[in-house]
Image (cartoon, grey):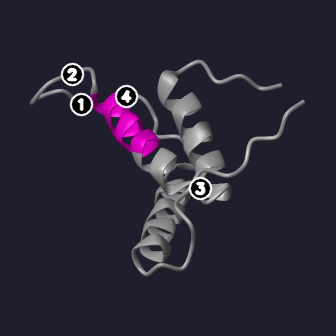
């Protein structure tokens, strides 16, 4: 299992899963957490030296598509059923 070391990488993976499960409420919170994690350090004159994960643009586009579907009533916003192990 390839484990990413940065918090933003793990949040991005969780956001991708929430989008796949069409769980908009969780996806919305994870997107906010991702934005916070990616902008936490630095300041006004700070130049980001870390690379943005390559999946970032695709996941953010998928989030936007899910948001649009939810706003048009095309998908449920409830969390999917959890499955007991």
First of labels 4, 2 by sequence position: 4
What residue sits 18% from the left and 27% below the top? Answer: 46
Task: Name the mark nearer the viewer: 4 or 2.
Answer: 4
- Crowd rating for badge 3 (residues with CA inside 10 Å; few <14, some 14–19, many 20+): many
The magenta segment is 29-39
What residue sits 48% from the left and 60% below the top? Answer: 63
Please name the residue that numbered disc 1 is placed on. Answer: 47
Which SS class for mark 4?
A: helix
- Crowd rating for badge 1 (residues with CA inside 10 Å; few <14, some 14–19, many 20+): few
51 relative to 49 in the view: left or right: right
Q: Residue 42's mark? A: 2
Image position of 46 with respect to 53: above or below: above
Please name the residue that numbered disc 3 is placed on. Answer: 19
Q: Residue 37's mark? A: 4
Confirm whether the magenta stretch covers residue 38.
yes
Q: CA distance from mark 3 to mark 1?
A: 30 Å
- Crowd rating for badge 2 (residues with CA inside 10 Å; few <14, some 14–19, many 20+): few
Task: Name the mark nearer the viewer: 3 or 2.
Answer: 3
First of labels 3, 4 by sequence position: 3
Which SS class for mark 2?
A: loop
């Amino acid at each position: 299992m390839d484990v990413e070391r940065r918090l933003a990488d793990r949040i991005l993976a969780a956001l991708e899963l929430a989008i796949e499960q069409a769980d908009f409420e969780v996806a919305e919170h994870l997107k906010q957490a991702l934005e916070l994690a990616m902008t936490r350090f630095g300041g006004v004159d700070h130049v980001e030296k870390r690379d943005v994960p390559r999946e970032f643009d695709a996941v953010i586009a998928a989030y936007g598509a899910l948001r649009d579907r939810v706003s048009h009533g095309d998908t449920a916003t409830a969390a999917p059923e959890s499955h007991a192990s």
